[in-house]
Image (cartoon, helix red, strand yellow):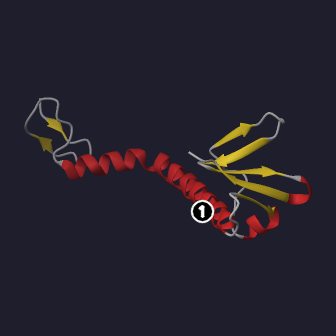
Amino acid sequence: MEKVCLECGQNIRGRSDKRFCDDSCRNAYNNKLNSDQTNLVRNVNNILRKNRRILMDVLKEEEKGMTKVQGEKLKRLGFDFKFHTHTFANNKGQTYKFIYEMGYLMLENDWVLIVQKKP
């Protein structure tokens, strides 16, 4: 019984467990298989990277390692508050949201405290 390539349908020669006729068919098949997940993950990662870059840029303006900024300024720069990597609750019960090592805490009157976690 002849086996056929899962991507192009051509007959396959070689090992009995071979599923593709060559590397390009294998790559094309796997790219199609993963394209929906890849697009979602890529889009989320792009948002996370942009959020991190915005926090880093705003924090670089200060020399203390933390700063307060208006939330509206972050929004104008393109910051998306719906995306973060993890949260941290301190002893005071405040919950910081982090994008990798860059964190922020929502304060009163639309102020945001930006911090950087030291390694």
Left/right placement of residue 67 relative to residue 19 reads: right
Image location (x, y in percent) of residue 26: 25, 46
Left/right placement of residue 72 relative to residue 27 reads: right
Q: Residue at x 67, y 50 (%)?
A: 83
Given residues 29 and 112, the one toward you in this image is 112
The N terminus, quarter of image: top left
Image location (x, y in percent) of residue 18: 17, 35
Given residues 119 and 105, the one toward you in this image is 119
The C terminus, quarter of image: top right
Determine whether the residue tagged by mark 1 lies in a helix, strand or loop: helix
Residue 12 location, quadrant: top left
Image location (x, y in percent) of residue 102: 64, 52
Left/right placement of residue 34 relative to residue 47 reads: left
Given residues 118 and 47, the one toward you in this image is 118
**View extreme (right): residue:** 109
Is residue 55 shown above or below 119?
A: below
Packing grade of label 1 (10 A; few <14, some 14-19, many >=20) is: some
Image location (x, y in percent) of residue 19: 21, 37
Is residue 31 shown above or below 53?
A: above
Where does label 1 land, which residue? 53
The amino acid type found where label 1 is placed reads: Arg
